[in-house]
Image: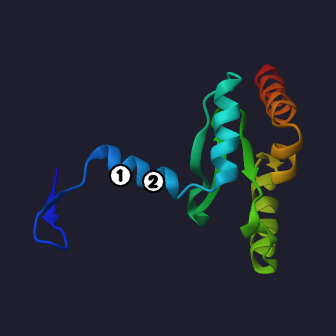
Amino acid sequence: PPASKNAVGGDRVTTDAQRQITAVTKVPALNRAFLAVWTLHGGPELEAEYKFLPERNFKADFCHVATRTIIECSGQVHAIEAKREDDAHRNNLATREGWTIYYVTPGMMRENPVKTILWLIEAIKRAERT
């Protein structure tokens, strides 16, 4: 691993584990909670930060590529007016291109996370059958 000097002149080594911890701490709490419950209940594999319209650099929080299903965790950033406008534009384009979009809100994960996750897992299973 690459080493650099820390504040007191000693070597500082960045390990893969440290990079992973840094990456996880940058993930919003709602996304982490969603993924924990999703995994616990055996949800199918999802791609995180998936570029579903690469020519536009649009990313989904989570994506089940085989069924063209997007799951968005709508946290605090989505409450900003400009972000809502961007999201609406992005989501309209995604829908036009055949993607199905589901939203998970903080309230859903607070009130009944298991019901929310099981409902989404069932939605993906149904999409796989069609």
User: In this rendering, is residue 42 above or below 62?
Assistant: above
Q: Amino acid at mark 2?
A: Ala
User: In this rendering, is residue 125 above or below 23?
Assistant: above
Q: CA distance from mark 1 to mark 2?
A: 6 Å
Q: Position of residue 90 (x, y in %)?
A: 74, 64
Q: Position of residue 47 (x, y in %)?
A: 58, 40
Q: Position of residue 89 (x, y in %)?
A: 78, 69
Residue closest to the far bottom = 82
In the rendered image, is residue 105 in sight?
Answer: no
Crowding near the residue tagged with mark 2, few <14, some 14–19, many ≥20 C-alpha atoms within 10 Å: few
- The quarter of the picture where the C terminus appears is top right
Q: Position of residue 107 (x, y in %)?
A: 87, 51
* In front of the other: 17 or 82: 17
Instruction: Look at mark 1 in the image and give the residue it sits on.
Output: 19
Disc 1 is placed on an element classified as helix
Tag 1 and tag 2, C-beta contact below 8 Å: yes
Say which quarter of the image contains residue 125.
top right
User: In this rendering, is residue 17 above or below 95?
Assistant: above
Q: Amino acid at mark 1?
A: Arg
Q: Is residue 127 left or right of residue 10?
A: right
User: In this rendering, is residue 6 above or below 33?
Assistant: below
Q: Is residue 8 left or right of residue 103?
A: left
Q: Residue drawn at (57%, 64%), measured in percent from left and top?
A: 57
Crowding near the residue tagged with mark 1, few <14, some 14–19, many ≥20 C-alpha atoms within 10 Å: few
Instruction: Look at mark 2 in the image and give the residue it sits on.
Output: 23
Q: Residue drawn at (50%, 50%), measured in percent from left and top?
A: 24
Q: Residue drawn at (79%, 33%), measured in percent from left and top?
A: 117
Say which quarter of the image contains residue 7.
bottom left
* In front of the other: 37 or 72: 37
Q: Residue drawn at (15%, 65%), measured in percent from left and top?
A: 4
Q: Is residue 70 left or right of residue 47?
A: right
